[in-house]
Image: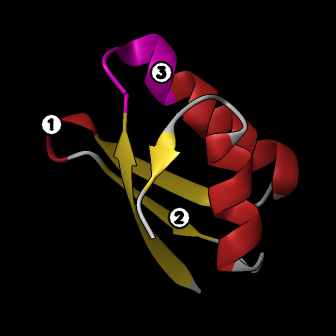
Amino acid sequence: MQHQFDVQGMTCGHCERAVTDAVLELDPQAQVRIDRAQHRVEVDSTQPREALAAAIAAEGYQVAP
């Protein structure tokens, strides 16, 4: 299932890696695509949207509902 998130606070490659690693820790099979300029994170995962959003937020980023 594909999930799309509006994520504020990603400013660099380190931020992208932190978000990607947080998602992959929850679901190692997930596919993560990040468009930092658009503040968009797309995730293909079987995990619930809420769990993915919580994992990203736990890294210190704001996830819009």
Instruction: For mark 1, give the secondary structure.
Output: helix
Q: Amino acid at mark 2?
A: Val
Residue 15 — which label? 3
Res 23 visible: no
Q: Earlier in the sequence, mark 2 or mark 3?
A: 3
In the image, residue 59 lies at what x, y percent? 67, 30
Instruction: For mark 3, give the secondary structure.
Output: helix
Which residue is the extreme one toward the bottom? 1
In the image, residue 57 lies at what x, y percent? 63, 43
Residue 43 — which label? 2
Q: Amino acid at mark 3?
A: Cys
Question: The C terminus lies in which quarter of the figure?
Answer: bottom left
In the image, residue 30 lies at what x, y percent? 68, 61
**Separation of marks 3 and 1 at Cα, in angstroms:** 12 Å
Question: The N terminus lies in which quarter of the figure?
Answer: bottom right
Q: Earlier in the sequence, mark 3 or mark 1?
A: 3
- The residue depicted at 63 percent of the width and 45 percent of the height is 56
Res 2 visible: yes
**Separation of marks 2 and 1 at Cα, in angstroms:** 17 Å
Label 3 packing within 10 angstroms: few (<14), some (14-19), many (20+): some
In this rendering, the answer to whether 2 lies above or below 64 is: below
Residue 37 — which label? 1
Bounds of the magenta segment: 9-16
Q: Amino acid at mark 1?
A: Ala
Q: Is 21 on the left or on the right of 38, as rendered?
A: right
- The residue depicted at 16 percent of the width and 47 percent of the height is 38
- The residue depicted at 52 percent of the width and 35 percent of the height is 61
